[in-house]
Image: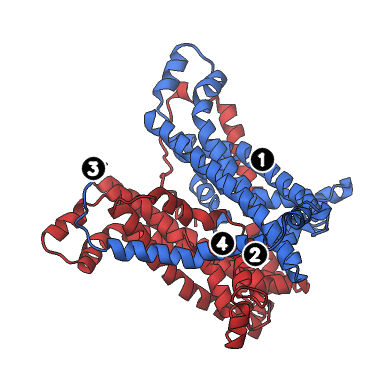
Chain colours: A blue, B red
Amino acid sequence: MAKRKSVLPGRRLTLGFTILYLSLIVLIPLAGLVVKTAGLTLPQFWETVTSPRVLASYRVSLVTAFFAAVVNVVFGLIVAWVLVRYRFPGKKLVDGLIDIPFALPTAVAGIALTSIYAPNGWIGKLFDPLGIRIAYTPLGITLALIFIGVPFVVRTVQPVLQDLESDTEEASVLLGAYRWRTFRRVILPELIPPLLTGFALAFARGIGEYGSVVFISGNMPMKTEITPLLIITKLEQYEYSQATAIALVLLILSFGLLLIINSLQRWSNRRLRSS
Amino acid sequence: MAGAVTTVTAVSNETRPKHLTEARWVRWTLIGIALLFVSVVILLPLITVLLESFRKGWSVYIEALKDPDSIAALKLTLTTALIAVPLNTIFGVAAAWAITKFTFRGKNLLITLIDLPYAVSPVISGLVYILLFGAQGFLGPWLFEHDIKIVFATPGIILATMFVTFPFVARELIPLMESQGVQDEEAAVSLGSRGWRTFFRVTLPNIKWGLLYGIILCNARAMGEFGAVSVVSGHIRGETNTLPLHIEILYNEYQYTAAFAVASLLMLLAIVTLIIKSLIESKLVRSKHGE
């Protein structure tokens, strides 16, 4: 990039406004969270964020978000594959439906999923006689997070699959490789970066998700209480410093994931450009 | 709505050469799995909302929407979006202009910071404003003295919504304006065009579809946000309830039909948003191919 002074106007105005607005809406409020937590001594902080109920909530959030993201990687790959490579009736509709979890308010998704998977709901009814309960268990939370996570994997894999040149695939076929082998050896390696990115995005979203989960989770402490809900519970009990301490842990976890996602995306883009 | 929805990656319909695709049974098995997955995970909840909201008939549906509390929630939701979306749009344009038209140190850091609200749990997005403006917060005592209410009132709801929808417009514009470069604007300036004129006559026509795209996504999220708003709202019926919060209250009071009726409004918003989005996307694809 050539370093030269731009002749365009508005540098000071736009940059100044950007930084001011960013500070007022995002940075100062987030800094407030850190400052508030600093009011606790280290042992107090540690005791709060490692108490049994809080630990249980991390476990519920992490485990359900992890499994939901894994399911989305598998099915998201299949959906993206089918959308890019095959022709079938209703393809455009399916492609449009993928964005629904982005656009549908989480509370709407939450009550709809709960009524489907409750013991008297359409799907819940099928599993209830087998002694399997879906709603109000970690399984229900996982299902809600699967819904939320669908677009992340599909939309990160789709463009990469689209841009995949067919010459390496051709070469592999010419060399006599079977289809499955071609997929494993030639196509899959190209898809690893977007799959990992999609996984991380879905996982990160799943950990912080609230609206679609609160209805279906049943919210039992130690069993189906997710970390974001525990923060709200603490707030409602006026335990501000506890709520803040737990929020800080969640925030650090999210930032860590954001950094990982950013470097994954850079890696993915580099591969895309060099291929 | 079939046919109205496409992606920017333009679903291609060409058939692949036979040696580069799978056996027929593999193809149809994969298609079957994909269709089943999308139907159960995404389509079924949509159908449920529709069926549940009309379960007791049209009149009960209308009755639920005409309830004063529902109307109040609708008004608050519209007010919130009407303030949060334009402000974030102005920010998005300014940020994209600063980032794509000039070079400066810390640009990547700035882009990451703009993305922050995406990574933050909605619950935390609400919590931070409680810590600033709540009774026990940093500015709480001062606000109380001056009788200004922010949290558990409309301003708090608007702030939390602004936080959550903060990156939407900027995120759409930055890559778009990056790819368009600065030549058009530089040409206009060298011909004597002034700042605002350059923006409105040269830049805006170039980015209008991308801008619109960002605005409708921002709006959909602003009207549908639940977690962040739930923390700062205080849940006062008819006063600080937005549509999503109203759904929660109705649902927890076992007024399922009414809850789903209100939910169906928001579902309609989501579907309309996606249809507009796909129309814009086909414009974007066409304008890219037209070059």
Q: Between residues B6 and A147, which one lies in front from this camera angle?
A: A147
Q: Is residue A71 visible?
A: yes
Give whichever of discs 1 and 3 has the lower sequence position.
Answer: 3
Q: Which residue is mark 1?
A: A71
Q: Report how far apart the C-alphas of labels 1 and 4 lie in the structure.
A: 35 Å
Residue type, numbered disc 3: Ala
Residue at 53%, 24% in the rendered image: A183
Neighbor class of circle 4 (other Cα within 10 Å; few <14, some 14-19, many 20+) is some
- Quarter assignment of residue B10: top left
- Mark carried by residue A31: 4
SS type, badge 3: loop
Pointer 1 and pointer 3: residues touching (CB < 8 Å)? no
Q: Which circle, 4 or 3, is nearer the viewer?
A: 4
Q: Which residue is mark 2?
A: A36
Q: Which residue is mark 3?
A: A2
Q: Between residues B145 and B258, which one lies in front from this camera angle?
A: B145
Q: Which quadrant is home to the N terminus of chain A?
A: top left
Q: Which circle, 1 or 4, is nearer the viewer?
A: 4
Q: Between residues B244 and A199, which one lies in front from this camera angle?
A: A199
Residue at mark 4 shares a chain with residue at mark 3: yes
SS type, badge 1: helix
- Quarter assignment of residue A210: bottom right
